[in-house]
């Protein structure tokens, strides 16, 4: 979500002073009313990589978007474009009859994908149904187009994933949500709504979606902040599960009171001089 201009507080973009010292790429490359796709990201990310390598510098992928990282490392399958009318129809069915009804349909049309998706994972269940309905082929067969991470390709990069205790992570999420609202998240959302507006992907960003619902009177400020915390915690758990699927990942346990500078130094040594890490 850092690709979107104007979505700064809720995405945790680096401060302007930091960005003036260190070159960041793929920040602020799309307006919030644009539907920024994985394919578009890969095109711009590969161009950035070529430019970085031309300067003889290493590139660091930093963030919590494992799907985009997997696409960058191993490629993506070419599925059909989004069919918003069909998605709306499927979402309405789920709201009226429960998400399990869509999972049952998927079990009939694509049992392999249904077996690995939770019945309440609506986003992925709906996408899988969309693919099989539009293309006539199950998404599991499309995904066989992913290049397998093997040999040199799997060893060509190094990954470090930070791992914190559940209590520490929940406390950090709690403080981050408080900082977002103190920094003016609601004003940021109002500015986008009054200006270009949100595209469907952008308005699904955790923090922005709940803030928009609050501004429409859906729930109180306190309830909104609690909901963002819960949704962020769920996302963090999913990200950790995603990261476990990468063959090159190295887990780094971080203590609650460990200074950020110390963690950064450990990461640096793992990436560039692992033999020196005690």
Image (cartoon, rainbow, N blue to C red):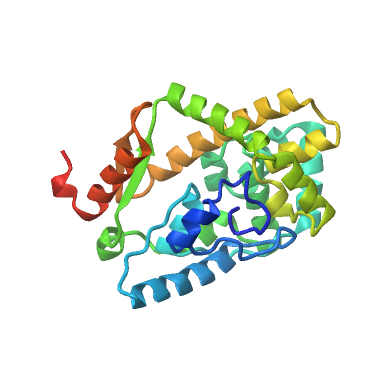
Quadrant for residue 149, please give it.
bottom left
**Height in image: 198 above or below 180?**
below
> Residue at the top extreme?
167
Viewer-proximal residue among 230 and 129: 230
Viewer-proximal residue among 61 and 95: 61
Judge from the rendering whether residue 171 lies leftward or rightward of residue 100; answer left or right. Answer: left
Q: Residue at x 39, y 25 (%)?
A: 165
- Numbered circles on residues, count: 0
**Height in image: 231 above or below 11?**
above
Q: Position of residue 215 (x, y in %)?
A: 82, 37
Judge from the rendering whether residue 220 lies leftward or rightward of residue 104; answer left or right. Answer: right
Q: Residue at x 46, y 28 (%)?
A: 169
**Height in image: 106 above or below 142?**
above
> Residue at the bottom extreme?
54
> Residue at the front extreme?
17
Judge from the rendering whether residue 257 lies leftward or rightward of residue 271; answer left or right. Answer: right
Quadrant for residue 231, please give it.
top right
**Height in image: 190 above or below 94?**
below
Viewer-proximal residue among 153 and 277: 277
Q: Position of residue 112 (x, y in %)?
A: 52, 46
Q: Quadrant of the C terminus?
A: top left
Q: Residue at x 41, y 75 (%)?
A: 51
Q: Position of residue 214 (x, y in %)?
A: 79, 33
């Amino acid at each position: 979500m850092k690709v979107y201009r104007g979505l700064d507080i809720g995405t945790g973009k680096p401060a302007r002073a930091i960005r003036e010292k260190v070159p960041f790429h793929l920040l602020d490359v799309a307006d919030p009313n644009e539907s920024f796709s994985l394919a578009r990201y890969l095109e711009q990310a590969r161009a950035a990589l070529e430019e970085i390598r031309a300067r003889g510098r290493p590139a660091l992928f930093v963030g919590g978007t494992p799907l985009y990282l997997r696409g960058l490392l191993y490629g993506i399958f070419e599925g059909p474009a989004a069919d918003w009318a069909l998605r709306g129809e499927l979402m309405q069915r789920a709201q009226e009859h429960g998400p399990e009804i869509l999972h049952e349909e998927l079990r009939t049309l694509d049992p392999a994908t249904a077996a690995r998706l939770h019945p309440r994972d609506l986003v992925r269940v709906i996408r899988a149904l969309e693919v099989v309905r539009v293309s006539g082929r199950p998404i599991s067969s499309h995904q066989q187009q992913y290049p397998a991470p093997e040999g040199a390709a799997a060893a060509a990069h190094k990954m470090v994933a930070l791992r914190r205790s559940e209590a520490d992570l929940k406390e950090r999420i709690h403080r981050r949500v408080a900082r977002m609202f103190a920094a003016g998240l609601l004003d940021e959302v109002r500015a986008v709504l009054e200006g270009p507006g949100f595209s469907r992907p952008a308005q699904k960003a955790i923090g922005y979606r709940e803030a928009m619902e609050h501004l429409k009177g859906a729930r109180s400020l306190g309830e909104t902040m609690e909901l963002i915390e819960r949704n962020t915690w769920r996302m963090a758990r999913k990200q950790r599960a995603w990261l476990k699927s990468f063959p090159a990942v190295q887990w780094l346990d971080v203590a609650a009171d460990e200074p950020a500078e110390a963690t950064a130094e450990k990461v640096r040594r793992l990436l560039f001089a692992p033999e020196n890490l005690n």
